[in-house]
Amino acid sequence: MSVIQDTIAMVEEKDAGQPEFHQAVKEVLATLEPTVDRHPEFVKAKIYERIVIPDRVILFRVPWVDDSGDVQVNRGFRVQFNNAIGPYKGGLRFHPSVNLGIIKFLGFEQIFKNSLTTLPMGGGKGGSDFDPKGKSDMEVMRFCQAFMRELYRHVGPDVDVPAGDIGVGGREIGYLYGYYKKIVNRHDCVLTGKGLEYGGSLIRPEATGYGAVYFAAEMLATRGLSIQGTVSAVSASGNVAQYTIEKLLHLGGKVITLSDSNGTIVDEQGIDADKLAYVLELKNLRRGRISEYAERYNVPYYPNKSVWDVIREQSLKVDMAFPSAHENEIDGVNAAALVKNGCYCVSEGANMPSTLDAIHIYQENNVLYGPAKAANAGGVATSGLEMSQNSMRLSWSREEVDQRLHGIMKNIHKSCLDAAATYGQQGDYLMGANIAGFIKVANAMLAYGVV
């Protein structure tokens, strides 16, 4: 067995019961095989074995009191995976599905995603099995304060800088940061995604969605294509989906789907700017369900179906897909249906939204495939720009941040293609993203010696 297969086997044995983490490790390490012969120094220093083990894992209880006066208890996590190139950086996820394996997979992916941005950020991730859905603002505030009572001792502007993720938006970041500031009596950049009034960056809410579209545009350009006139499917209806749609509209594309955990809408006339404004109000202010869109605009609604199920079952024709919901939302069956229905470009806005079977189908059918660690790096890249602005005590204009974001996504695209070509797989974005992200971190780990 090679060092790669040995390392995968070690993870499967030592990290039992963590299927998402196993999947992430396999997806990355399998593409690193070409680096083994070229970098015997990595093998000798056991870099492959070391990079799959977190620097530390923090697990803590979060007791809080609900509106009825009853005590509730949740689990809190922070996995500080690798800080070879900078402070740990990665979001906090509040969702009932959160467990150690999911947080480890997200933190592992974050190492390479952050490396690709070229900004000095290491990889980490955290969260809780708390579900903010259906909770009052006061309950969310009390939970966030209880969560931060433990988390504050493990984070800091030069140590670990969390951000938001699923279930953690502007409201939650505000409560978390307000309590952190109260405890430490300092105005640190210890969270990103903050409100503009207290140190946030313009374009941060839009960044992941914008970045996924910028990356798709770069991939299309390699074939002489553009977004103008295309039809896209977008899943979910949160920040990533909302601003993916906004940027696609700006570049002349049409989007026909949105979804949430209850079901999917299909609007074959296209979700235009006015309809998108309604979605922002529905989801960000009223916290309603996407079924209300179907009622308002008299379009089909498919309860308990994902976007990809609907595309398969209704034979919807789309040119591009932007999975923006959660891990493993597209399996092999739905990937095959996407290809059959004309999809030639997939740009991942969520973290690991395609299974390994789905990825193989994309690649076998010559689909332009932007893996999450490259395509959705715009969010963490702009978080890095927020950190820079906070450190310098200034604020850049919307145009300047967007310009920097666009430049970063273009550079990530080039890095992926260059690495793929260098290691013998021309045009393989998955291999290119993984190798480009890995080499930088591996060289830093090598420079530090055995630590």
Image (cartoon, grey):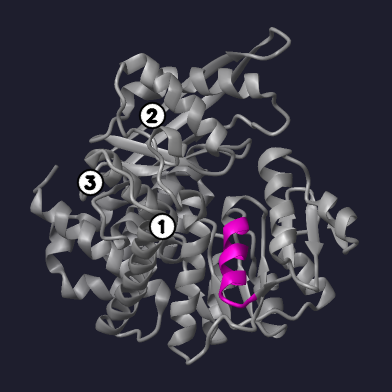
Report the residue at 80% width, 66% height from top: 266
Q: Quadrant of the N terminus?
A: bottom left
Which residue is disc 3 drawn over?
86
Q: Quadrant of residue 319?
A: bottom right
Vertical placement of 321 versus 446: above or below?
Answer: below
Kindly report the distance in space between the C-alpha atoms of the residues bearing marks 1 and 2.
20 Å
Image marks 1 and 2: residues in contact by CB distance under 8 Å: no
Give amino acid for label 3: Gly
For marks 1 and 2 on the same chain, the one whose residue lies earlier in the sequence: 1
For label 2, the SS is strand
Direction top: furthest residue:
69
Question: 174 left or right of 136?
Answer: left
For marks 3 and 2 on the same chain, the one whose residue lies earlier in the sequence: 2
Give amino acid for label 2: Ile
For label 3, the SS is loop
Q: Which residues are magenta?
A: 241-253
Question: 303 left or right of 435?
Answer: right
Residue 25 is labelled as 1
Residue 58 is labelled as 2
Towards the viewer: 243 or 450: 243
Counting every numbered tag in the picture gives: 3
Give percent across and percent down for residue 174.
Answer: 49, 29
Work out whether residue 1 can be spotted: no
* Residue 242 among those drawn in magenta: yes
Kindly report the distance in space between the C-alpha atoms of the residues bearing marks 1 and 3.
21 Å
Report the residue at 40% width, 44% height from top: 90
